[in-house]
Image (cartoon, rainbow, N blue to C red):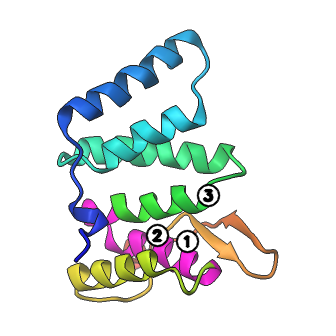
Amino acid sequence: ATTSEMEVEVPPEDLKKFEAAYYKQLKAGKVLSSTQFDYAWSLVHSKYPADIRKGLVLLEDLFMREETNKRDYIYYLAVGNAKIKEYSTALKFARGLLEVEPDNRQTQELEQTIKKNDGKGGPGRDGRWCWDGCRGSWRTVRIRDSSAQEK
């Protein structure tokens, strides 16, 4: 049996190591994408919601700046959002990946875990990116919050 990605917890000493590397490069004026990803990954796997949210911000930044590794960024955006119970956003990320890689078992399992935890399994309405099948690329989307208009 494999451990669910959502159950992985990074030891505090590893988080501190990735954090130190990130801030050292930030202070020097140039953070490598790999360093930022390592730090974001460790934050997403923290048990603290504030850390997870910080990791999501770093992943979003990587997604917007980098042309490569978008699959990893989106996958861990799904994981992090699920861990902070933002299930509709997490599902949107997972389903976007499955449109591109329908046979990706890791993402299929994540989608099932998100649906199970959410209890709804409906499509997300507040995600920020989706796969544009016509253009064959990721694109930013704006989706209005329907709950704000139910007055």
Residue shown at the point (82%, 75%) measured from the top left = 135
Q: Tell me the chief SS of the magenta region.
A: helix
Q: Is residue 55 visible?
A: yes
Find out whether the residues at labels 1 and 3 contact each other: C-beta distance under 8 Å. Answer: no
Give residue 67's position: percent from left, percent from top: 72, 51
Q: Quadrant of the N terminus?
A: bottom left
Q: Which residue is mark 2?
A: 126
Residue for badge 1: 143
Q: Secondary structure at mark 2?
A: loop
Residue 90: x and y, percent? 40, 70
Left or right position of 107 against 30: left
Q: Position of residue 111 (x, y in %)?
A: 38, 80
Answer left or right for 45 relative to 72.
left
The circle on residue 110 is none
Sequence order check, earlier mark of 3 and 2: 3
Which corner quadrant of the image does residue 62 belong to?
Answer: top right
The residue at which mark 3 appears reads as: 70
What's the amino acid at mark 3? Answer: Lys
Left or right: where does residue 101 sit relative to residue 136? left
Report the amino acid beneath label 1: Ile
Q: CA distance from mark 3 to mark 2?
A: 19 Å
Q: Amino acid at mark 2?
A: Asp
Start-end of magenta stretch:
81-100
